[in-house]
Image (cartoon, rainbow, N blue to C red):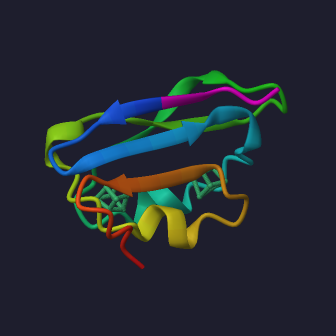
Amino acid sequence: MTVGRRWKTAHGTITIAADLCKGCGLCIEFCPKQVLGQSEKFNQKGYHYPEMLTPEACVNCGYCQLICPDFAIWNEREDGENGK
Ligand code: SF4
Ligand code: SF4
């Protein structure tokens, strides 16, 4: 079972399912607010997964969800509009 960790942000939540991640770093690189960073820990597959560093700065744009090739990160906005 894949367990996700969820962070409350200023406009909703971001969930990261660490064990689905393949450590490509795209979400970290392309987040327009640079709120994600690489965990020092490894997931079950042996990859460093992302974690939220500054949740208060996340704008819930949904770009991380859009760009992740493995559906390992997702965005829920409190207004129900889930971005791109
Ligand atoms: S929703 Fe946007 S601001 Fe928030 S972590 Fe994802 S890409 Fe960054
Ligand atoms: S884009 Fe997806 S697979 Fe790549 S590091 Fe981020 S969560 Fe992991």
Q: Quadrant of residue 10?
A: top left
Q: Residue at x 36, y 73 (%)?
A: 83
Q: Is residue 70 left or right of residue 15?
A: right
Q: Quadrant of residue 31?
A: bottom left
Q: Position of residue 22 (x, y in %)?
A: 74, 48
**Position of 9 relative to 67 (above/below):** above
Q: Is residue 80 left or right of residue 2?
A: left
User: If the image is split into quadrants, where does the N terminus sit?
Assistant: top right
Q: Which residues are magenta?
A: 1-5
Q: Position of residue 55 (x, y in %)?
A: 24, 38
How many numbered marks have been drawn onto this rendered protein structure? 0
Relative to the observer, which residue lies in front, 19 or 37? 19
Relative to the observer, which residue lies in front, 81 or 4? 81
What secondary structure prevails in the magenta region? Answer: loop
Verify whether residue 3 appears in magenta.
Answer: yes
Q: Residue at x 70, y 66 (%)?
A: 69
Q: Quadrant of residue 43?
A: top right
User: If the image is split into quadrants, where does the C terminus sit?
Assistant: bottom left
- Of all residues, the one furthest to the bottom in this rendering is 84
**Position of 62 relative to 9 (above/below):** below
- Of all residues, the one furthest to the top in this rendering is 41
Q: Is residue 11 left or right of residue 70?
A: left
Q: Position of residue 80 (x, y in %)?
A: 32, 63
Q: Residue at x 84, y 33 (%)?
A: 45
Q: Position of residue 61 (x, y in %)?
A: 30, 68
Relative to the observer, which residue lies in front, 36 or 66? 66
